[in-house]
Image: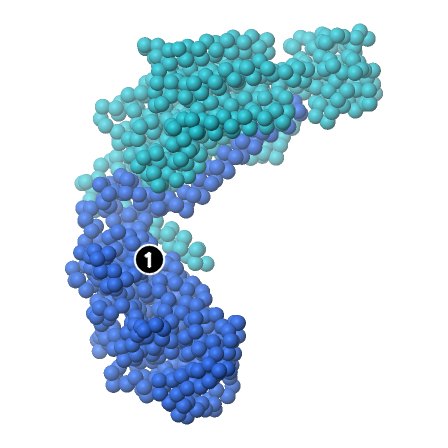
Amino acid sequence: MKLLTRRALVIMVLALAVISGLLIFTVRYLGEASRWVQHSANRHLYTNGQLKAAGTIYDRNGEVLMQTVDGTVHYHENQAVRAALMHAVGDPNGNVVTGARVVWGKRLAGWNLLQGAYRFNQRLNHFSSDIKMTLDAELCAVAYNALNGRKGAVGVYNYKTGEILCMVSTPTFDPRHPPDIDKEPERYEGVYINRFLSAAYTPGSVFKLVTAAAAIDNLENIDSLVFQCSGRTVIDGEVVNCPTAHGKVGFEKALAKSCNVAFAQIALAVGADALQTYADKAGFNSCLEVNGIKTRVGQVDVKDARRPDLAWAGIGQYKNTANPLNFMVYMGAIANDGVRIEPKLIKDSLFLRLVRSAASKERVLSPETAMRLGSMMRNNVISSYGEGQYRGLELCAKSGTAEVGGNRMPHAWFAGYMEREDCPLAFVVVVENGGGGSRVAGPVAQKVLQAALNRYTGE
Amino acid sequence: MDALFTSLQRLLDMTAARWANITMFFSSLSTIGFADIYTLFVRWVFPLLAVGILVRCILPLLRNQGYNRIWGYLEVPGNIKIPIRHWENSLGRSKLSDIVVNLPFVSRNHAVLAYHRDYWTITDLGSKGGVSINGQKIESNGEVHAGDTISLGGAEFRLLAAEEVNDDFAATQGRTRFSRLGEGITPGKTLLLLILFQVLGAFQLYYTMPEETRLTILLTVLVLIAVECLYYIIAFHCSRKYLELELLAFFLCGLNLLVVAADVPNQLLKQLIAIIMGLVIFVILQLIIRDMERARKLKYILAAGALVLLAANLVFGEVRFGGRNWINLGLITFQPMEFVKVAFVLAGTATLDRLLTTRNITAFIAFAGTCIGALIIMRDLGTAVVFFGVFLVIAFMRSGDLRTIAYALSAAVLGALAAITLMPYVASRFEAWGNVWQFANTIGYQQTRTMIAAASGGLLGVGGGNGYLVNIPAADTDLVFGILCEEWGLIVALAAVLMVVFFSLFAFFLVRGCKSAFYAIAASGTATIYLIQTALNVFGSVDLLPLTGITLPFVSNGGSSMVASWALLAFIKAADSRSRAHTHESGRLI
């Protein structure tokens, strides 16, 4: 029998093959069942291709953003709110892949791994299928109106809790009446992309906040340095220029005036390694996740850059790209004494609020550096952008006018935060090919922040 | 950390969801029927019971490996007694001999010593030194009795009878590392769990199925439970064998009835009769092959019967679902190939002396060729694959020749390629394979619907009778795994498949302790059939393999398939010659 015992191993091999097949199926099941279940032929969830019932999406104040009643989808009654939140909620056809309808589709459909599509008494369990977002529908509508048809993105989040209050991307449309995108390709260019989460733009001068952070920590004599700006400087035969000659400028004034000549020299003094380190700390070259949604990675790579390229990189040009959300979170880190709070779009349950507080923090700057940057950003507003326009906001900000080449207008950036304990908000505004940063993007930020202040403090 | 929080949150959500369900239940009592509440709770019980039954059956079967009874001794000078543990024992210099005689003048495979109740035979395997009994040189084989002296080319042994038969030996000796695990598990309690599962399942369908079928469902399951209890009580008193194998099969039969009840309730009676017939044949077949002589006769009778069935099928066969594999006898229709499987496994068997003397398996090859050829003519390619797989395994078990197997395999691959190119029906199956979502409404229809149904069930299932997969044609046979997943949950479905796989694993463990090569090969053949059918059925329906119309043993709807599954199980049962221990616990009925 020893002989047959050995030969019978072939049975063992077959049995193991079947068992591993079962394992493969189980792994696939765990990974893909949520996708399988959402096929429109699934009669547990769909009748005639329409969801029988789905969870409701609410904003932070309980406004209904989307709900399904008897197989029909209903949106918010206000047109501006619908358009402003189209990217956050998702479009009817699921083309916005970062929209709640796609990302949390299985939850909305009432499916989970344990329970499957089981419905007690044929009814959807709204407790587990509803979604409460951190967004403020009104605030998003304000941002949408402020953009006034221009392409771009607006984001506002609470830098103490991480809750994103405003997330608007344009172009957009009213999901209740989807337009024929193909008829107006120019107007609806990239309409399904949530630019706030998934776009990367040349940052321009807002990137000086990264260069400045590197300078504060690496150049001991930074406060005593004085730069002579004649409107242009030559580095290894290549010209870096400023819109106007700023004359003699110190570090703080260089940031307030956004002097390219000064910052080109600062970048060279800091060096490629330090600049790369601080760019990485600021969130470049790494992916940030918002409730599982991966955002676009902003890129900075100066490790092997030539000196003129390093100078251009230090003022946010060269090959640098920035994702609006990532940059907003950097602003939040500066505001929050150098500690970055993970942003989120879904309201946490009470339990998670208790345990999360310790888990999602990360220090990216020392408190001193953050404080110094903050005071310089405050100075920017007072001395350059005009405190009068932003009265009461206690605004700290930096503008950016990112050259994009060709004959196109530069991207307008405006990013920063409000230094108010009762309204701790950081923000970013990008207007594509909008023109000058503080002139074009500044007023958008002003309208949104003023509205937020009104809503949350009554001022 | 984050993953931990997410899972904690999910847990809380679930608890909250449960709570919400309960509050909802109180707030709108009027609209909720008892059926809803029943399903709400029992769907948590089924996975627990299924896993419990699986574990409780597996552990005792693995408890003491191999067979420990001693049939006699070979005494060598110096008063050393070598125990003879099998009915068939090879003697020789080879390390793979059952009794290794490491002397230079003994051949590698010298002789086979076989037990025949009141005498022994010794067969010379063509050794150089020859074999003699009491000094008399034998030609090919000769009878040996206790007290006789055997000489293998000069090495002398004296055959001694075994001492008093000691039944407790099995319980106390030869324990393996699994032995502790199985302790304290009594088959009676497992049977109670099994009955609980079937009763709860029957009531689940009672509440969800249309009025007119309800009584049939309850009665059918009730009869099944009665049969199970009756069999258990008789078997417990009449046999000292382990009963877990039958318990697993009963569990699968219960699932089978639940699936049939949800899909085609009017076939319940037919299926119940098939289960009882299967059980009867299972018992009779065991009784017949207990005696080696009878088994050998049966082998030829069945092989001849199989050829007749094949011919009849080719002449009178009816076409159903693309294959001409049905015979209609007016009152009953059946699939003859299911029964040919049983004959096929038996035809491949051989005793150890035959196995070691004649490497010639021409007759078996011819028989296999006939069967597979007939299947191809009938366009039943799935079954052809099953037969071919069993043929390969049995041929390997008998010859140990890898090269021949490799030739056969490459020939089969060429044949398969030819089939794909020549038969459009087969080609479309291969085209869909791996891309079913692209063809979700055409050639990938069945597979995608199975996966959708499986996903909809989650781990717990939506409850028996609440599924939609039953509306797909032939779902109760080909897509039965999907029905299990959808209605009873992934856990129950996986447990069911693992039970079938375990039959095969168990067969593998039995080979070492088999009395005769005959049983070892028959058990291995059965194991192979179960495994290949399981793989083709389950993996075919979820797109890991091309879809074929093969049944899942015991679980798929189909009378012929059910009877054949039971008949094949008899071969595994026959190979298990161990007996239950006389310990206090396992001596009780429940």
- The residue indicated by pointer 1 is A98
A251 with respect to B79 (left or right): left
* Residue B284 coordinates in the image, percent (x, y): 49, 12
Which quarter of the image is occupied by the C terminus of chain A?
Answer: bottom left
* Residue A244 coordinates in the image, percent (x, y): 35, 87
Give the chain letter at badge 1.
A
Chain B on-screen colour? cyan
Which quarter of the image is occupied by the N terminus of chain A?
Answer: top right
Q: Residue furthest left?
A: A77
Three-letter code for the amino acid on which mark 1 is drawn: Thr
Disc 1 element: loop
The residue closer to the viewer here, B289 or A241, is A241
Question: Who's blue, chain-wise?
Answer: A
A29 with respect to A183 (left or right): right
The residue closer to the viewer here, A444 or B180, is A444
Residue B149 visible (yes or no): yes
Q: Find residue B366 and report its image quarter.
A: top right
* Residue A276 coordinates in the image, percent (x, y): 49, 73
